[in-house]
Image: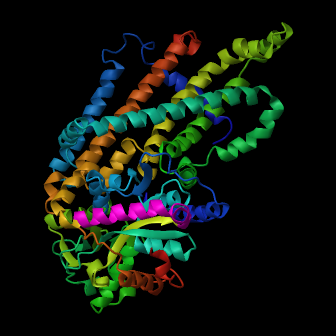
Amino acid sequence: MTAASPASVTGSGRGAAGPGPGGGAGRRPVPGWALGLTGLAALMAVVELAPRAGLVQERFLPPFSRMLSALADQAGTPEFWRALLETLRGWALGLAIAMAAGVLLGIVIGAVPPLRAVTTSTIEFLRPIPSVALIPLAVLLYGTQLRATLLLVVYASFWQVLVQVLYGVRDVDPVARETARSYRFGPLAQVRTVVWPTALPYVMTGFRLGASVALILEITGELVIGSPGLGRQIAVAQTSGAVAAMYALVIVVGLIGVTVNVIARATERRVLRWHPSIRGEAIA
Amino acid sequence: MIRLRAALAAASSSAVLLLAACGGGQGSSDASGDGPTSVKVSVIPIVDVAPIYLGNRQGFFAEQGLKLELVTAQGGAAIVPAVVSGQVDFGFSNFTSLILARSKGLPLKVVAPGAGSTGVGGKDFGGVVVKAGSPLKSAGDLAGKRVAVNTLNNINDTTVRASIRAAGGDGKAVKFTELAFPDMLAALDKGNVDAVQVVEPFLTTALKNGGRLVASNYVDTAPGLTIAGYFTSQQTAGAKPDLVKRFAAAMQKSLKYSGDHPDEVRKVLGTYTKIDPALTGSLTLPTYPAQVNAASLKTLADLAVQDGLIKTAPDTKDLLP
């Protein structure tokens, strides 16, 4: 990935967020969410019909209805809800730590040019290291408990946030910066009035990307390390040969992913409601 | 996933050596006050570890003043580092893994047996299965064929080789493929492999779906083969001899009880696995031996050398309590 691409990804991501409530009002009678549901329904139909038609064997991919009934069975057990809570807790905790560290360090590093020059190569070296490669280290440090997975989650989502914040800070209008300086704004006041408003859209993009990555790593960690959560339940279902139960849990993970994304987008829209990209006035 | 786990095992065992050399890790169970000592055990959620769950329910660990905390892991790759670093007090592993670890210098010590072969050909908890209609009839036919095992260079491929040799075939000629147990039956069905070495509950599932058993590899390897057991690090064994003694005693009682009450074993499976309840009644359970069969352990070590997993066999007596 080149240095410029994350910024452009940010731009297109913001544009894509547009067609939700703001864009193209009243053009089409079918709202976006209805189209999304149609896609989901089609997927369900394929998963239901493919095994029934004999395209795949039922004992390796059970029909969707069987997965749903397995899901209902799961939902009746306290351990399912405990696992769900554990997964959500690990995800939220990891994301919170990554956000706090990423935003803080991003603003500090971004605001001090020599510091940025010193850290750029290090960040570019550490960032692409896949979190899963750190599993042995995590297990060695923290055993097979929550903290081992937390390390992976924080590591993976931290870079998403940090890099976005760095670009955000670099995007600050030099004139605005100089103006603030000539009015003798202190460093904190500069961050609050000049840097933060500019960086905020980038921070929110980092939040959205980090939220999905954190969920992926949370589940991966639970699956491979065996720390408590839905991932471990999936692994147990696998080793028990409970195929329908396994897919039921996979569906739950998918649903969490959708929810996380919806919440992240809603948060983004709320926090940035003053921003031109959300108000829809950016299009000239 | 399997590839990842293998890499993990390699990376972690070297990392473990480093850490062990630094003497790192603090015990998770400090005997504090009068309450029961909490003891952490890392196990794999499979049929083999039913006795520890059952014994815990029966209060055998409480009798010894132990408060058991069971941590499930996906395999030895996660368990061995956790035990060596002292994150958990005890772990569950098959003996070939322990022999390999020992020969690499990892300071491990077996404290209790875990599961063993039934010793009855055709009626063991693990075996080699082929598709219905496969031309393969016996272990000897496996020579030159593709056989799936869950981990390469471990207990299952060495015992399958032993099985082929016992049937008069060429044990070296078989081609092993690494596949996770849950993926094996699909691979067999698609014809990606000619045979799969599976354990329960996949063995029963395979047989129910028309698969045919061609070899009971654990039975063919040695009479009364002890397959897996509970181990600790020498550091823990040296620092907490009393804890080890009490855990071993509770474990012995649990194994004995499980051997005597197979119905309760089948029932306890539902508490920590998701095995279909309709299936638990027909599973073949492993034996839960009271003692590690030292001769069978020696056989496993010799097989590991014969198949080139290690250069020289470690003295298996060092591994035993």
Residue at the outermost top position: A183
- Nearer to me, A75 or B214: A75
Residue B203 rendering spot, x and y as whole percentages: 22, 66
- Would residue B6 be seen by someone viewing this image from the given angle? no
Residue at point 56% right, 70% down? B106
- The main secondary structure of the magenta stretch is helix
Locate the N terminus of chain B and report the quarter of the image it occupies.
bottom left
Residue at point 16% right, 52% down? B277
* In this picture, residue A154 sits left or right of residue B109: right
Q: Quadrant of residue B14?
A: bottom right
- Nearer to me, A258 or B149: B149
Residue at the outermost bottom position: B168
Residue B154 vertical placement versus B3 (above, below) = below
* In this picture, residue A262 sits left or right of residue B133: right
Residue B161 rendering spot, x and y as whole percentages: 35, 83
Residue B108 rendering spot, x and y as whole percentages: 51, 69
- Nearer to me, B281 or A247: B281
- Would residue B252 be seen by someone viewing this image from the given angle? yes
* Bounds of the magenta segment: B234-258
Locate the C terminus of chain B and report the quarter of the image it occupies.
bottom left
Residue B21 vertical placement versus B33 (above, below) = below
